[in-house]
Amino acid sequence: MNRTGTIISPLDSIKTIKGASELTHPTKGDCTEIGNNRILHMQEAEGIGSISFPISIKGVSEVIHEQIMMGNHAMMDKLGERLVFERMGARLYEALITKYNGTNHQERLPELTRIEQFYLEKLKHFQNVSEVITNMGGDPTALTPAADVIGTATVGWIQVLTDPRTTFLQSLEIMLHLELVDNAGWELMIELAERNGLGDLAIQFQQILDEEAFHLITVKQWVQELTLNNEIISPEQNAVLEFDIDSIIKH
């Protein structure tokens, strides 16, 4: 049974609170000093990563063009982010497929072929971005600041999907988070391409966004349907829960 709440055992809760107050000595005040300390570190810290220098003459011309248009390296930085994000998306769909294969009552779940399709499209998008970076004279293996940040931010997602305790629906909810962020990312890439006068690239990104939009609509529908059908826990877990409740009632 779930024993994480305090209401189920009020006497022990009182002992826990008393022990915490006797054995610890929290400082008075709010988080102001912690905030000031963080600001101090921010002032001393260097930036998180950097934009790699182009590896070809064509790349140099692209960077100069971008600097004239935007005054920064946003295009290459965000391309690096897209590269990392799409690769992480493919890894997450791989983990979701494993979760599907390890789940009983698969007839209650979405079609595996559709999930596999989304996985292959994520992998294709990763390859598309890699080619774009190469064609612009960049290095797809170089980690840009935005790529570094998004790589760190998505670590928790893969931890959820690879946790053997999580259900298919719980994993699918993480995929919904992924697709929401992914759609917003591609919308920004289209605008960046258009502002840099890269119309052909904007069209290519729009095609990717169209596929990602379908991912989002479909995954959102799956989450809604499974949640409304009370698939938040597995039938086996539900059977155990019903047994525990019956035992409590009898006693």
Image: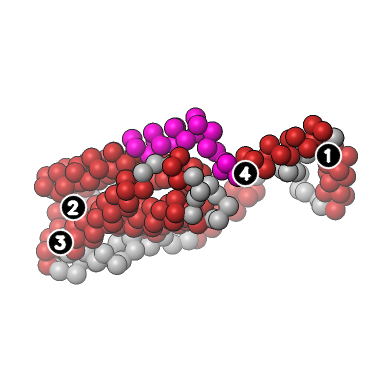
Q: Residue beneath label 4, please? A: 237
- Count neighbours of disc 1 (C-alpha within 10 A) and say few if under 14, some if 14 to 19, many if 20 or more: few
Kind of residue at disc 1: Ser
**Does residue 208 lie above or below 84 as drawn?**
above
Q: Residue at x 68, y 39 (%)?
A: 241
Q: Residue at x 11, y 64 (%)?
A: 58
Of labels 3 and 2, earlier in sequence is: 2
Question: Distance between the Cα atoms at labels 1 and 4?
Answer: 24 Å
Give the mark, 1 or 4, whose residue is nearer the N terminus: 1
Distance (Cα) linking label 2 and label 1 = 63 Å
Residue 226 visible at all: yes
Measured as percent of width and height from the top left, residue 40 is found at 55, 55
The residue wearing badge 3 is 135
Instruction: Identify the residue under disc 1.
Output: 9
Q: Mark number for residue 66?
A: 2
Whether residues under marks 2 and 4 lie with C-beta atoms below 8 angstroms apart, the answer is no
